[in-house]
Amino acid sequence: MASAGIVDAEQGINGAAAHPISAGNRRLFLRGASSVHHTEECDDGVRVHILHHPTETIDEIDCDAVIYATGFLPAPLQGILGELYHDLVLEDGQPVVSRDLRLATSLPTAGSLFIQGNTEHTHGLTSSLLSNIAVRSAEILQSITAAVRTPVGSVAG
């Protein structure tokens, strides 16, 4: 269940997006499963190249300005993970995180590393909302309990 503030914000954004479209002057673009690939400053504004992750296609939009307004700054993982940080697999400086919130490592670890939060780059801006913590925690627990464990010294069959 979304909080009232989020619902109000979504309704406000959707309303703001609908009015200019009906007037024929679209000024707000909402893109799902996408991120800014890069931008180019032009004489009359900014050209934004937007990567749609599921299809890996890149759209271009000419804008007057671009506002990066997530307000999110992830916690530095090196301080949390210590020496294990150097074993993380990174893409574009961000840790690779699987669907079940497991951190990818370049070397095998004694146990899996799961992360709750710091996943906005892979799971979307809402991944750290308080309303999602129980769902994400259940996904982590399900992944842990579903893992097949082979006792040390035995041969997997």
Image: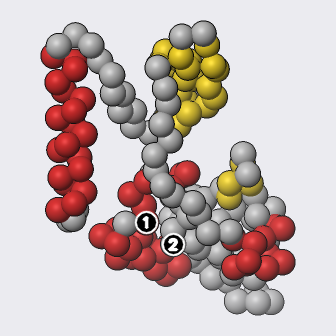
In depth, the one of 59 and 65 nearer the eye is 65
Q: Which mark is residue 34?
A: none
State whether residue 127 is above or below residue 49. Answer: below
* Left/right of residue 29 with respect to residue 152 in the rendered view: left
Tag 2: amino acid: Gln
Residue 52, percent from left and from top: 50, 30
Q: Which residue is mark 2?
A: 116
* Corner quadrant of residue 136: bottom left
Up/down of 111 relative to 102, above or below? below
Residue type, numbered disc 1: Ser
Q: The residue tagged with tag 1: helix, strand or loop?
A: helix
Front residue of 67 and 32: 67
Q: In this view, which residue lies farthest toward the front?
A: 43
Q: Which residue is at the front of the view, 156 or 77?
A: 77
Q: How many marks?
A: 2
Image coordinates of residue 55 in percent, x first then y, are 51, 28
Residue under the image location 17 percent in, 44 percent down: 11
Residue at horizontal 51 percent and vertical 72 percent from the top:
116
Asked whether the beta carbons under mark 1 and mark 2 sit within 8 Å of each other, the answer is: yes
- The residue at 34%/76% (across/down) is 134
- Left or right: residue 58 versus residue 32 is right
Q: Which residue is mark 1?
A: 128
Give the percent coordinates (x, y) of residue 9.
23, 50
Q: Position of residue 65 (x, y in %)?
A: 49, 26
